[in-house]
Amino acid sequence: MSKIEVDAIDKQSGSTLTIGGSGTTVQLGTGASQTGFGRTGTVNWQTGSIKTATFTAANGEGYFANTSGGAFTMNLPAGTAGAIVSVVDYTNTFQTHNLTITPNGSQKIGGVATSFIANTEGQSLTFIYVDDTEGWKNIQDSTSNAIGNASLVASGGTESICGNFKIHTFTGPGSFTVSKVSCTAAENVVSYMVIAGGGSGGAAYGGGGGAGGFREYKSPLDSYTASPLNGNPGGTSVTVTAQAYPITVGGGGAAQPGPGSNAGNNGSPSVFSTITATAGGGGGGCNYAGGTPVRNGKPGGSGGGAGRDSTVYFGNGNTPPVSPPQGTNGGQPAGNSWNGGGGGGGATAAGGNGSGGTPGSEVAGNGGVGATTSITASPVGYAGGGGGSTSVTTSGGTATQGGGAGNNPGRAAGAGTANLGGGGGGGHNNGDSGAGGSGVVVIRYKFQ
């Protein structure tokens, strides 16, 4: 059917004018307005006039109320059947600065002749005037508006939530992909923990393996309990941008078989962005013909402990140097003969020294203490050094926080725990050394 155009209509008391039949569209000309047709539950939104102070609403209009500067009032118009008014919390501040909605004169809102207080964040309301008994009836009250995410958005690894923070844990290689940065610059500075793979222990009365390098940075916005090696302030921060960050998680050094005299193997580094944690150093080996090079503990994130009967051949930690230090030195025996192997260095404490001096009195050095942090929402110890070995059944070096215990004739050398970055235990003359534990990468940031 064709469009019907009406230029003018004379009023005729008691008569009815019908325009168009069922299904016909009645279209107003450009610049024309309508009155008296009743409404279908929609309003004309006043996007060009954001309300910031008390005002009087008009029938058929919807308003955006900005109460960020303080509370104010929206006065409803004189209600007639079918009148409609809507309002929306423009800045999501109704919960702190209320909008008071007041009926005209003695008219009512929901059957009560008093004002209504809009006090919920993000609230949107639509009122229709029904009759003088109920007055304005609220036909729509939404408090779950769809709001664009203004925070950092990323994916990768195993994801978990701690309050307003998201945690990404990588126990193997992967990618931390930032699809959107935060509108607040400070939220793009992430917390991180990067731990390399630990070194394995040395064979044949060997020293313990050094822990993988431990590097942590706690964002100024975060509130978890960090380790003593937290790099804020003084360390290296990482501000992420919208891109993919390859993640490398270092493996632990392979065990050395016994009998033999080989020094342990270094682990592998872990990497996130500009942050590299250096692999843990292998523990020194020992036999009576092996000489100094075999007995040396190797340098690394934390250094490997020296093999039995050595003097000063422990591995240096924090190699290459970073601030805060990513690890410590390995331990050494106290003399040239009949002394246990030194413990591998840990993240926060050097490996223990071996002692003894006479046959049967050997005591191996314990692995150095690692670091405890709650970056994954609960306290966990990482990067402990491996214990040194000895020929005395009751005195292999012990280890904590991921390090492996040292070997003795009655006990196999312990391996570093996977994804804790601990060093492996030193091996007894006829037993294998312990392998180093693999590393881990954790990234944490405010996501809401």
Image (tube, rainbow, N blue to C red):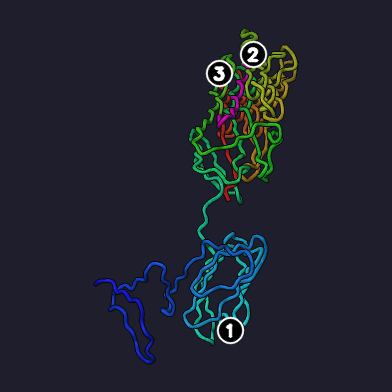
The Cα atoms of the two marked residues, 2 and 3, are separated by: 15 Å
Say what amino acid the circle numbered 3 marks: Gly
For disc 1, the marked residue is: 107
Which residue is rendered at x = 44% and y = 77% of the image? 35
- Residue at the bottom extreme of this rendering: 14
Q: Secondary structure at mark 3?
A: loop
Tell whether label 2 touches label 1 (CB within 8 Å).
Answer: no
Q: Which residue is mark 2?
A: 295
The local crowd at label 2, few if under 14, some if 14 to 19, many if 20 or more residues have their Cα within 10 Å, is many
SS of the residue under disc 1: loop
Kindly tell me whether residue 409 is visible in this rendering. no
Which residue of the protein is positioned furthest toward the left in this rendering?
A: 1
Q: Quadrant of the N terminus?
A: bottom left
**What is the secondary structure assignment of the residue under circle 2?**
helix
Q: Is the residue marked by circle 1 packed among few (<14), some (14-19), or many (20+) residues within 10 Å? A: many
The mark closer to the camera, 3 or 1, is 1
Give the residue pinned by disc 3: 258
Q: Is residue 243 magenta?
A: no
Residue stretch in magenta:
271-284
From the viewer's side, name the closer residue of 153 and 443. 153
State which quadrant residue 294 falls in.
Answer: top right
Task: Left or right? Give the position of 31 relative to 355.
Answer: left
Report x, y in % for residue 173.
49, 33
Question: Comparing marks 1 and 2, which lies closer to the viewer?
Answer: 1
User: x, y (%) of residue 222?
Assistant: 66, 44
